[in-house]
Amino acid sequence: MEILVTGGAGYIGSHTCVELLNSGYKVIVVDNFFNSKPESLKRVQEITGKHLKIYEVDTLDEVTLEKVFSENNIEAVIHFAGFKSVGESLQIPILYYHNNITGTLILCEKMKKYNVKKLVFSSSATVYGMPKSVPISESFPLSANNPYGRTKLMIETILQDICAADKQWSVAILRYFNPIGAHESGKIGEDPSGTPNNLMPFITQVAVGKREKLSIFGGDYDTHDGTGVRDYIHVVDIAKGHIRALERIIKTSGIEAYNLGTGIGYSVLEVVKNFQKVTNKKIPYVILKRRRGDIAECYADPIKAKTILKWSAEKNIQDMCRDAWRFQVNNPNGY
């Protein structure tokens, strides 16, 4: 079975490609390498000993994207491609709306034309906005408080409408919480451009000496130690969630959303302490003001994915810290 993976060179995309290849799927990757590097896909092939078909294509490029569909017998799509920085989306919202939403519309048009109606969509827990309680279940009200989150929410709505109009479509929406970690080989991992937006690569860059100290945004939240609590989940567990979702949509029709999280909340300081414990590296930090839009606590109720997809997270916080550090040590300057 041939699976198209858009944004397959990215952080979660590359790990999902590994799991797809190891599960016996043929994988076609579309990526414009704007926020990723071809080296990650080279290493995916090294890890698995299997071949990927790679197209350097932007999902906004209708002509070349059509070529990908016409040249291959694609049966399902896993859609990662899109801009993903909350902070950046506040500064350049027009670009985020155009890239993420228009790119998805073009992809869906090509899928419809070539009768490919099986889709796993990479969404985000940001679609829950400012939830009034935790853990967060899929039945919670949806909202978003930044342009990035709103693009995810709008795409979810578009996919709902597509499935309502054509009952042959089968879509799984995966709402990630906070993916961290790296492949245990140390060959692929999170490789942000510039200053990291996420906690773990910031920690590993401090540990490896690239940065002087960690900036923690907010020390006065209503949590047990004052720092924000999040549901951190190993990227390999996330990748395996895509395989379970793919297996599900191949056999069914309609649309369902699933949380991918551990159901456990860790504060920023707890992540730092666990990292220090498994690496013996001291992480100096400074506590700054809260960032606009951040919330005190955010962690998943993962029971739906466990019940329907037969998926649950297997790796713990120390596994996440250990694997993230291994990738950083092996790749001090990234790919």
Image: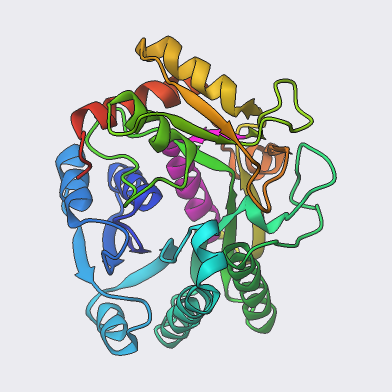
Up the image or down, 33 lies above or below 47; here it is: below
The residue lying furthest to the right in this view is 132
Image location of residue 279, percent across then percent down: 36, 14
Up the image or down, 164 lies above or below 214; here it is: below
Residue stretch rendered in magenta on the structure? 231-249
Q: Residue at x 23, y 26 (%)?
A: 329
Q: Is residue 316 visible?
A: no
Up the image or down, 62 lies above or below 27; here it is: below
Q: Quadrant location of residue 76?
A: bottom left
Magenta span main SS: helix
Viewer-closest of 308 and 198: 198
Image location of residue 148, percent across then percent down: 57, 64
Viewer-closest of 99 and 94: 94
**Horizontal side of residue 74 vs 186, given as left or right:** right
Viewer-closest of 124 and 112: 124
Viewer-closest of 128 and 225: 225
Q: Residue at x 20, y 35 (%)?
A: 331
Number of numbered labels in the structure image: 0
Q: Residue at x 46, y 85 (%)?
A: 109
Image location of residue 127, percent across then percent down: 68, 58
Residue 241: say if magenta. yes
- For the N terminus, the quadrant is bottom left
Q: Residue at x 44, y 76 (%)?
A: 116
Up the image or down, 308 lies above or below 57; here it is: above
Q: Is residue 22 visible?
A: yes
- For the C terminus, the quadrant is top left
Residue 43: say if magenta. no
